[in-house]
Amino acid sequence: MKMQIQAPAKINLYLEIVSKRPDGYHNLQSIMHTVSLFDTLIFEDSSSIELTCSDKTLPVDKSNLIYKTVVKMQQAFAVNKGIKIHLIKNIPTGAGLGGGSSDAAATIIALNKMWNLNKTKTE
């Protein structure tokens, strides 16, 4: 099976720090909107986790957010499958456009379908 998903860039229209949490992070209130700039992720069945990227400066190892998302999904839902992912990077890295988190969200959506998990958005 093969699947392609576009992950949109997003901008913060509003951001407020509401409070500081005991763990040192902050609770935020935010309004975001997508813009017409996308990364494209291509998913294929595989027996292991394989991640490649059009941007050779971006790490494709266990430090990558997409890779971490795959591992978390395997652990959370007791999945013994891999996945091959190719990221076509169009959203500039570190530009505050949410490319990494959007790529991770697209990965969750794709794995839910490709691995036949049938999980709800809440799950």
Image (cartoon, rainbow, N blue to C red):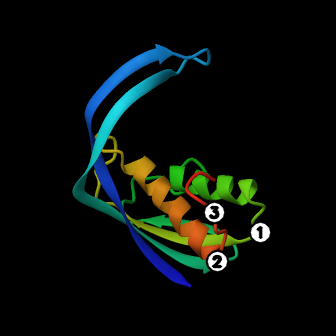
Residue drawn at 31 percent across, 27 percent down: 15
Q: Which residue is drawn at 64% across and 69% down?
A: 118
Q: How crowded is mark 3: few (under 14 residues within 10 Å), some or many (20 or more)?
A: few
Crowding around mark 2 (Cα neighbors within 10 Å: few <14, some 14 to 19, many 20+) is few
64 relative to 14 in the view: left or right: right
Establish if 62 lies above or below 111: above
Question: Mark 1 = which residue?
Answer: 80
Residue at 75%, 65% (x, y): give it: 79
Tell me which amino acid carries mark 1. Answer: Asn
* Badge 3 element: loop
Q: In this view, does 45 lie to the left or right of 99?
A: right
Estimate the spatial distance between the alpha carbons at disc 3 and disc 1, rounded to whole Å.
17 Å
For this orientation, the residue located farthest to the left is 36
Residue 38 tag number: none
Residue 107, percent from left and from top: 51, 61
In which quadrant of the rendered view does residue 81 lie?
bottom right
Residue 101 % position (x, y): 44, 48
N-term-proximal mark, 3 vs 2 = 2
Disc 2 element: strand
Residue 9: percent from left, percent from top: 30, 52
The circle drawn on residue 119 is 3
Q: What residue type is labelled 3?
A: Lys
Spatial CA span between label 1 and label 2 = 11 Å
**Circle 2: residue type:** Ser
Residue occupied by mark 2: 46
Kindly indicate whether the residue at mark 1 contacts the one at mark 3 (C-beta within 8 angstroms): no
26, above or below 97, in the image: above
